[in-house]
Amino acid sequence: MVSVDHALQEWIVDHRIGVLDPLLEAITLAGSFGLIWLALAIVLAGPMWRRPTLAARTAATILVAEAASGGLKEWLGRDRPPLRDPEPEPLVSLPLTSSFPSGHATVAFACATVLALAVPRLRWPLFALAALIAFSRVYVGVHYPLDVLAGAVLGVTLGFAVRYAGAGIRRVARRIEASS
């Protein structure tokens, strides 16, 4: 499985389409630190959508996803794809952290899940954006496909966990308020 993972990563990097390089670099940058997801949550939480807690829930999701993927990276310690000489090298600077799971993919899929649960009619564009951010990490040469796949699975799991933990907290708060 690992050899297929490495071979697929090499094939994707070896078959980059030059005109797409700046676009996928921009997408990978947009996925950094969950900022694009927070911006989307602020728009979707606005007066038209009437979801005042969505931005806070998304920010919490970003923190949880970053912590979980960071902890797993530290624990598992998988090396990033090697720099190759001659070209192609990564299109972005190689992160100093380990490779597995992809933090970008974890955050993207966690936030896409939280936002899709809040605004179901946008689920397909949200998950398409998450998939594009995840794929960009392989394309730019800093992750293997299994890194982003694991990040996606972890992210969806964390997205549901954040959503239902928040619902549980709200139920407890209403019970406390009702008993007062």
Image (cartoon, rainbow, N blue to C red):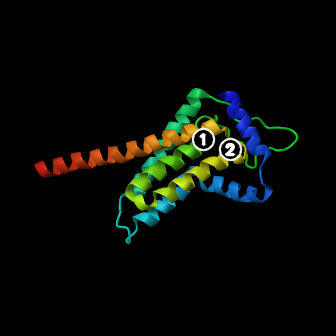
- Asked whether the beta carbons under mark 1 and mark 2 sit within 8 Å of each other, the answer is yes
Q: Is residue 13 left or right of residue 116?
A: right
Quarter of the figure with the N terminus: top right
Which residue is depicted at the point 58% across and 36% down? 101
Q: Position of residue 134 (x, y in %)?
A: 60, 47
Q: Position of residue 103 (x, y in %)?
A: 57, 42
Q: Nearer the viewer, residue 122 or 169?
A: 122
Residue type, label 2: Val
Which residue is depicted at the point 38% across and 68% down? 49
Which residue is most to the right?
A: 86
Few, some or many residues within 10 Å of mark 2 (<14, 14–19, 20+): many
Which residue is depicted at the point 35% across and 63% down? 51
Q: Quadrant of residue 116?
A: bottom left
Determine the secondary structure under disc 2. helix
Q: Which mark is residue 148?
A: 1
Residue type, label 1: Val
Which residue is most to the left?
A: 179
Vertical side of 97 occupied by 166: above or below: below
Vertical side of 114 occupied by 64: above or below: above
Disc 2 target residue: 138
